[in-house]
Amino acid sequence: MKHSVGPCQLCNRDELEKFEIPNSSVLWLCRDCELYQYGEIVDEDAYAAEYHSGYERHREQKIRTANIRLNRAASLLDRSSAQPPKLLDVGCSVGATLEAAKQFGWDGIGVDVSQDAVNFCIEAGLNAQKVDGLKLPFADNSFDIVCNWHVVEHVADVRETLAEWNRVTKPGGLLVMETPDAASPKVRKLGPSYRKFWAPEHTYTFTFKNLSRFVKDSGFEVEPSPIIGSLRNFSPTFAAYAATYQTYHGLRKLFGVQKAFQIFARKLVVDHTMTPRLAAA
Ligand SMILES: [Zn+2]
């Protein structure tokens, strides 16, 4: 099969394979790095109220999951500052991560392309704002932790997006993300017939390996994923829940049915003392 788009955005391979999900969408698969790419870019207006309505019903569950995710990230955070960590949640939806950040005593702000989602967060007493497109309305080096859950597979250009996330992360700060896993054995086995996995609004589908390469290219180093973090941050009841939750997901991974992965990465600290200076005119 010949490509009509390309080359591969990661490894530059010329020929990409057409990967068609029946009655849904077309992605282009690189057989070298297993990156699914060049999906049709969905207009941001598509992520209006309906996109988040299902999430609203499951908000309590999502807050519990967010607590576990942030607890894992917390084990990698530099806690030497007296200030609470500043967190940015890109694609904050109904604010589950912001709610969890609040419970951790962190200073969280969310952005989303959906005004309805942002309004929902604000009504819930959370800090959120609408953004359009790639550019984030924050200064360089603003956040200790930038997270995004099931966002990176939607973006128009993964390199530009990671560069912008890098820009707003403090040197030594964390980028934490979760996205569907193209390397999941169930996904590899069922391919395009795994209809619940593929979504027309996904412009990419990644593996841990290929997304890690993009992340490294963008000025981060990938950290070993923390398993659970310190359970002392939780009540005994919630600690038991978190341990069960993580065991369940570990078993799912073991049996090849886990269909998402996380990346925990740290922004490189660039040593400017080694930068050559231009001679004064
Ligand atoms: Zn490739």
Image (spheres, rainbow, N blue to C red):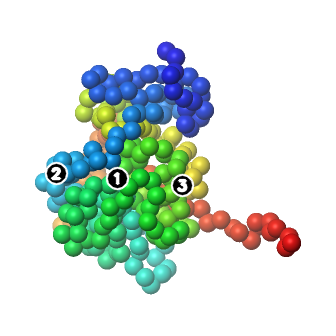
Indicate which disc, 3 or 1, sits on the residue closer to the N terminus. 1
Q: Amino acid at mark 1?
A: Trp
- The residue nearer to you, when weighing 270 against 26, is 26
Q: Quadrant of residue 23?
A: top left
Confirm or reject: label 2 Cβ below 8 Å from ligand 1.
no
Q: Position of residue 214 (x, y in %)?
A: 54, 46
Name the mark nearer the viewer: 3 or 1: 3
Category of crowding for the residue at label 3, using alpha-carbon neighbours closer than 10 angstroms: few (below 14), some (14–19), many (at least 20):
some
For mark 2, give the secondary structure: helix
Q: Could you tell me how far apart the alpha carbons at marks 2 and 1 are, in whole angstroms?
A: 17 Å
Residue that extends furthest to the left in the rendered view of this protein: 57
Identified at 38% across, 55% down, the residue is 132
Task: Give residue 53's mark.
Answer: 2
Indicate which disc, 3 or 2, sits on the residue closer to the N terminus. 2
Q: Are marks 3 and 1 in contact (CB under 8 Å)?
A: no
- The residue nearer to you, when weighing 231 against 76, is 76
Task: Give residue 163's mark.
Answer: 3
In the displayed structure image, the side of residue 17 where residue 93 appears, left or right? left
Q: Amino acid at mark 3?
A: Ala
Name the mark nearer the viewer: 2 or 1: 2
- The residue nearer to you, when weighing 2 against 194, is 2
Please give the residue where the numbered disc 1 appears in the rendered image.
149
Task: Give residue 219's mark.
Answer: none
